[in-house]
Image (cartoon, rainbow, N blue to C red):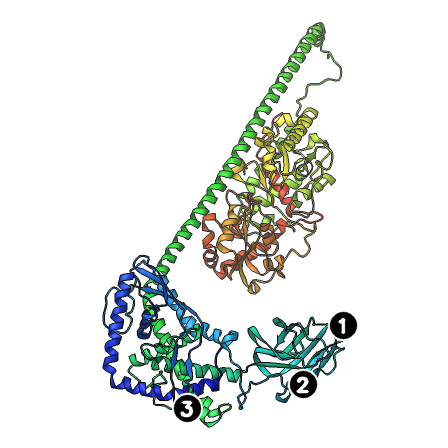
Amino acid sequence: MRKPVGALLHDRRAVRVPISGRNHLYKVSISLVFILWGLIFLFSLWISRGDGCQEGSILLPDGVSTTNESKLENNKDSDVLCEPPNGESHCTIHLNNSCSINASSPGSDNEILSSEESSSHIQATTRLPEDESSSTRVKPESKPPKGDISSDTVLLGLEEFKSRAFVSRGKSETGQAGNTIHRLEPGGAEYNYASASKGAKVLAFNKEAKGASNILGKDKDKYLRNPCSAEEKFVVIELSEETLVVTIEIANFEHHSSNLKEFEVHGSLVYPTDVWFKLGNFTAPNAKHAHRFVLKDPKWVRYLKLNFLTHYGSEFYCTLSTVEVYGMDAVEMMLEDLISAQHKPSISDEATPDKRVIPSQPGPIDEVSHGRELQSLANEEGGDGVDLELSKSNTPDPVEESHHQQPGRMPGDTVLKILTQKVRSLDLSLSVLERYLEDLTSKYGNIFKEFDKDIGNNNLLIEKTQEDIRNILKIQDNTDKDLRDLISWKSMVSLQLDGLQRHNSILRSEIERVQKNQTSLENKGIVEEPQKTVAKDKEANGKSAIPGISKTKGYSKLKKLEEKLGRARAAIRKASQLHNLTSIHHDPDYVPTGPIYRNPNAFHRSYLEMERLLKIYVYKEGEPPMFHGGPCKSIYSTEGRFIHEMEKGNLYTTNDPDQALLYFLPFSVVNLVQYLYVPNSHEVNAIGRAITDYINVISKKHPFWDRSLGADHFMLSCHDWGPRTTSYVPLLFNNSIRVLCNANVSEGFLPSKDASFPEIHLRTGEIDGLIGGLSPSRRSVLAFFAGRLHGHIRYLLLQEWKEKDEDVLVYEELPSGISYNSMLKKSRFCLCPSGYEVASPRVVEAIYAECVPVLISESYVPPFSDVLNWKSFSVQIQVKDIPNIKKILKGISQTQYLRMQRRVKQVQRHFVLNGTPKRFDAFHMILHSIWLRRLNIHIQD
C-alpha cells in the first residue's frame, strides 16, 4: 500500500541532507560517472551480441535516450526470455525486485525511504543493431525496402506511445486497492467521507429500521437498530462529496444484539436511481469492534447502499454503530499523482549505483520513461532551459513549499503552478508525438503509394471482370434465344410433318371422292346417252329438248368479289399518285395531311374502300371462354376488345360466309394459356393441339379454309406466345394473316402478310385520365423509364442509367410517392425498351401522355407501319447506342422536338381504344391493316 502524502514528504525531508551530499559528489566526479556509464553501455552491447538480443532495450521513438534503461542489465534477479527470428529478438524481461534507499539522519530512527513494493512485468521488443556507435541515442530505423512492409515495428511503437499517453494514466486513475492512499485531515487522521460532520447523510432505509442516521456519528452509544427478522434491511448514504471509495469500516459496539455477518455494498453517482453498480460482498467477523474492508476494485461514487444479508446469533435486534468510508476525492487524487510524478525522478537520480530505485508498478515506470523522453527531446532541441529532472532543478518545488507552509491542503496558487508545469510537460509530449508522426509519414509514404497503385490495378481488374460478366450474360442471352429458336423450329418442323401427313390423308380421301364422282358421272352419262340422241333429233326440228333452259354465261360469287377488289386496288393506286388534295377532302373525319403518313391520299382512299367493301365472317364454332372472348382489363386488353367488337357485330361483319372477303378465327391465346397451360411446365403443346383441332373442325365443316389454304383467314393475339402457338398449324403460320402485338421479324413475322397492332395496357378497362399531358415548356424531365428487369435490353438500360443521371431518370422501381402517369406527362421523351418480347405497352402510354416515344428494340415492326411514318414522331435508338441516349436526345433541337411532339398529338387518335369504336381509332386501324393484307391476295375458285 502506498504511504500517506505527509509521511512521504516527511521521509523526503529526512533523506534530504544525505542526498544533497551525494549530489555534490556527483558534480565533483562527473567525468567518473560518464566513464562508468560508458563501460556499462559497452558491457550491455556485448551481452546483447552474445545472447542474440538487447536485454532491457525498450523500443522507443526516434531520438529518445535509452541510457537509464540500459542499466537494468545488472539486475541479477531479472529473467530474460529471447526468441530471435530473422535478425530480430523479442525479449520478455521479468523484474521481481524491491529496491529501497536506506538513509539515516540525526535525531531519527533510521527512517526508510522505499519505493512501492510490487512486481512488474515489462515486455519489450528489441532489434539487433547493424552498426554499433558510442552515441547515447537509439539510431532511427532504416526505411524498409520497397514492397517490404515492416509493420511490426511501427505498430509496436504506436502501441508503446499510446500506452504511455493513456493506458498508464488510466490504470493510475482506476487504481488498485494497494495503489490508492486515503485522504488525510490536517491533524493526520484519515478523512471520513461518511461523517455527518463532513456533510454526509442518510437518505433512505427500510421501514423497520430505527436511528439510521446514528451510524454517521461518533457516539458509540447510539446505533442503527433493525429487527433481525426483517426481510430486507438496507440503508442509503450520501457521502460528503464524490469519492473514489477504497475502504469501508463498520462497527457494532452494542453488546446485547446480534452482529452483522454478511452484507453487500452498491454505489451510484446519482440518486434516486434504479441501477446500482456492485462494489463487493463482505463477511464481517463476530466481534464487537471496528472491521475494515478494502474494495478490490475502487469506484467513484457519491451514494452508497448497504444491504444487510445475514447476522450472528439469535438476538431480537441487529444493530450497527458506525459506518466510515475512506478514499480519495478528485483534487486529492490529482495532487497525489503530481507529487508522485515529481518524487520518482529525484529518487531515481539520487540513487547510488549499488542501490538503484526501480519502480515496480507499470504506471510509474511509464511516467519515468516518459520523463526521460521529454528530457531527451528538450536537450535535442537546443536546451531551452527546461529540465524535467526535478531533483536537479534550481526551481523551488511548489509542492514541497506548500507542505512547509500548510500541513493541510495546498493553496490555489500552488496548484496552478503545478498545473502549469504539467502543461509544459504536455507541450513537450506533443513535440514527441509530432516527430513520431513525421517518422511514420516518411516510412510509409511509399507504401501508401504502392497501396494506391494496387487499388488502381484492382479497379482495372474489377472493371475487366465486370465487362467479362456482361459479355457472358450477352452470350447467355443469345444462347437462350438460339435454344428457344431451336426448340421452336423443332416444334414447327414436327407440326409441319404432322400437317403434311394429315394433308396427305385428306388429299387421298379427296382423290378417292373424285374418283367416285367420276365413276358416278360416267355411269350417268351412259344412261342418258339415248336421251341426248333424242334431244339432237328434236333440235334438228327446231324445238328445245328441255323446256325453260337457255344458254347463259355464269359467274361465281368469289369471282365477283375478286373483281370488286381489283377495282379497289386501282382506285388506291390512282389516289397515291394525286398531288392536288382538295378534290378528296370532303370527309369531315379525315385526319389533316402531314408527314406522319407515308401517303395520306392512298391511306384515305384505302380506308374508304374498306368501309365500302370489307365483310368479315366470324366462325361460330368453339365454346367460350377459350373462343369468342378475351380479356378487356389487362396488358392484353387490345385482344379482348377486338374479339368482343367482332362478336357483337358491326358494319364489317356478315352472317353470310359467301359474301365475306375475310374469315376470323375467334380463339384467344390469352384464355387458352389461362385454361390449358400447366404452370412452370414451359410446354404449350396443349394450346397448339387445341388450335390444330379447331382448324380441322372448320376445314371439314366449311369449304373456305381449303379453298384458299387459309390465306383469307386471320387470327389476332397480343400474348407473347401468339407466334409460337400458330406454328402448330403450318398453313396458319405460313399462309394466314397473323395479327400480332409481338411483331418480331426474327421469329417469323412477315410484314407483307402479317399485321402489327399496338399493345395497350388498360388497368381499369377505360382510358379516362390517360390522355393528355403538360405543355412542352412545363416538361422538366428529359427522358424517363420505370420497369423491372425483363430481357437483355432492359438489363443494359438499367445497368447504364439506373438512378445515375438527373436528366435521364431510369428506375427499376419508382420511389414512394411518385406517380407513373405523372412522370410520363412531365417528360419530354419516354424510353420504350423491349422486354423478352419486342412489343411494349409503353409505346402507347407515351403517345397517350403526348410524350415522344423512344423505341429501343431489335427486329420490331411498329403498329400500322404501312400507313404511319414512325420516324416523324418517334426516336429509334439501336441497342448498342444505349450509353449515348442522353447525347442523342440532347442533340435534338427545340424546334425539332416541338414538331415531333405536335405530331404525337396528331397520331394519338389512331391508338385510342374507344368504348364504341370511332372512325380512324385503334379498332378501325387494326381492321385497315388486315384489309391491306387481303388486297394483296388473289383467290381463285
The residue at which mark 2 appears reads as 220
Mark count: 3
Mark pair 1, 2: CA separation:
24 Å
Residue 574 locus on image (x, y percent): 55, 41
Residue in the foreground of this view, choosing between 175 and 494: 175
Question: Within 10 Å of the Cα at label 3, are there few (<14), some (14-19), or many (20+) other Cα atoms?
Answer: few
Residue drawn at point x = 50 percent, y = 82 percent: 333
Q: Say which amino acid is labelled 2.
A: Lys
Q: Amino acid at mark 3?
A: Gly
- Identify the mark nearer the N-term, 3 or 1: 3
Answer few, some or many: residues within 10 Å of disc 2's Cα (few below 14, many 20 plus, some between 14 and 19).
some
Measured from the top left, where is residue 626 in percent x and y? 70, 36
Mark 1: few, some, or many residues within 10 Å (few <14, many ≥20)?
few
State the CA–CA distance, disc 3 to disc 2: 39 Å
Which three-letter amino acid code belongs to the residue tagged 1? Ser
Tag shown at residue 589: none
Secondary structure of the residue carrying tag 3 is: loop
Disc 3 or disc 2, which is closer to the eye?
A: 3
Asked whether disc 3 touches disc 1, contact meaning CB atoms under 8 Å apart, the reply is no
Q: What kind of element bears circle 2? A: loop
Look at the picture and state if 125 lies above or below 14.
above
The residue indicated by pointer 1 is: 229
State whether residue 435 is above or below residue 392.
Answer: above
First along the sequence among labels 3 and 2: 3
Q: Quadrant of residue 904?
A: bottom right
